[in-house]
Amino acid sequence: MLVLGIETSCDETAVALYDSSKGLLAHQLYSQVDEHAAYGGVVPEIASRDHLRKLLPLVREVLATAGVQRAAIGGIAYTAGPGLIGALLVGAAVARSLAWAWGVPAVAVHHMEGHLLAPLLEPEPPEFPFVALLVSGGHTLLVEVRGIGSYHVLGESLDDAAGEAFDKTAKLLGLGYPGGPALARLAEKGRAERFHFPRPMTDRPGLDFSFSGLKTHALNVLAALPGTPQDKADIACAFQAAVVDTLVLKCRRALRETGLGRLVVAGGVSANQAMRKELHAMAESERCRVYFPRPEFCTDNGAMIAFAGCRRLLAGQFEPSVIEAKARWAM
Ligand code: KG4
Ligand code: ZN
């Protein structure tokens, strides 16, 4: 089955074509990051208008790149939430309209299910069951995954998501938007031993997270210093180490508690090299295997939505024709 995937939940317009027998045929992404950078964050109204401008041209481009006629398409998958409601509505309306015009089913995909399944697009995909750590700008989740649609949330952030904590801390260090990758680059110049940040909620049982205190801690440390470039690099380094240590500790705990031997890590923060290194080391010591998406599929993309939608369509797990868009949506 050939499925067109559409992602418009935030500030990336992304489209892809996934074939259940041939794999990923084409994918394109238009990032709005330059439009939002001047405002220091995503402006929902601008995001919606930009998706409207870019989405259909991207669909045409992907079909042309893959050399696919629209008659070959068997279904359309789109991100129905969670995300910015205006941005989601653009993708949902376009996807449902194309599906209606082409006489094919449309399937509403949960954005985090898309992230969760992204590592299955790689050459050596993990088999079910596995533990998934999902770390994005909006979510931090540990999930026990038994199969497509069988997701049991083991733990989640009680306040800021890991990516959100990166972005907010980057902002107070004057690093602009998007902050996560910029903070990670600055951390490379920092000295690890200068500051020690807390590892939130690691001193008690359980698999939930809390990251908002780390940003406040960074603010307090910075306020007591002149704020030289080296001060900021040292703070970035200590902050990143605290987030990474906390995530690694909870992943180890989740693997032990579930008795599973595979860990899948996805979402924007899974692009973080320091975290990848530490998770590999932990997995090795636990005799487990860890799986990541390729870097371009860590952050938002159309391929993960086309793939998740394809698996849902093949399993017969999709809703009849209603235009769905949900700003909040539990997994
Ligand atoms: O998955 P994603 O593209 O969008 C959401 O679904 O939220 O994740 C974006 C998040 C942002 O918070 C961004 O700062 C963070 O992922 N991020 C990173 C890195 N690359 C992206 N955080 C830390 N290190 C990185 N290398
Ligand atoms: Zn995302």
Image (cartoon, rainbow, N blue to C red):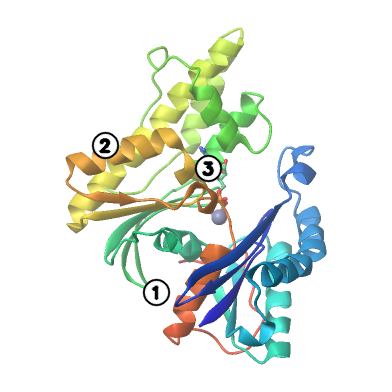
Is residue 129 or residue 293 the one in the foreground? 293
User: CB at mark 1 closer than 8 A to ligand 2?
Assistant: no
Percent x, y of residue 58: 73, 65
User: Residue drawn 73% across and 76% down?
Assistant: 94
Q: Which residue appears at 62% of the width and 60% of the height?
A: 83
In what element is the residue under mark 1? loop
- Mark 3: which secondary structure? helix
Kindly identify which residue carries mark 1: 149
The location of residue 140, given as percent across then percent down, is 45, 50
Q: Which residue is mark 2?
A: 281
Q: Is residue 196 left or right of residue 260?
A: right
- Image quarter in which the C terminus is found: bottom left
Q: Residue at x 50, y 37 (%)?
A: 212
Neighbor class of circle 1 (other Cα within 10 Å; few <14, some 14-19, many 20+) is: some
**Badges 2 and 3: C-beta atoms under 8 Å apart?**
no
- Calculate the distance from the C-alpha at mark 2 to the C-alpha at mark 3: 22 Å
Image-based side of 140 in relation to 68, left or right: left
Q: Residue furthest bottom?
A: 103
- Find the distance from the CA under tag 1 to the CA under tag 3: 25 Å
The vertical placement of 153 against 171, above or below, is below
Cα gap from disc 2 to disc 1, whole angstroms? 30 Å
Q: Is residue 223 above or below residue 199?
A: above
Residue 294 percent location from the top left of the image: 47, 50
Q: Say if mark 2 contacts mark 1, CB within 8 Å.
A: no
Q: What amino acid type should be assigned to the residue bearing mark 1? A: Gly
Let me know if residue 224 appears in the view: no
What's the residue at 41%, 12% (across, down)? 194
What residue would you read off at disc 3? 163
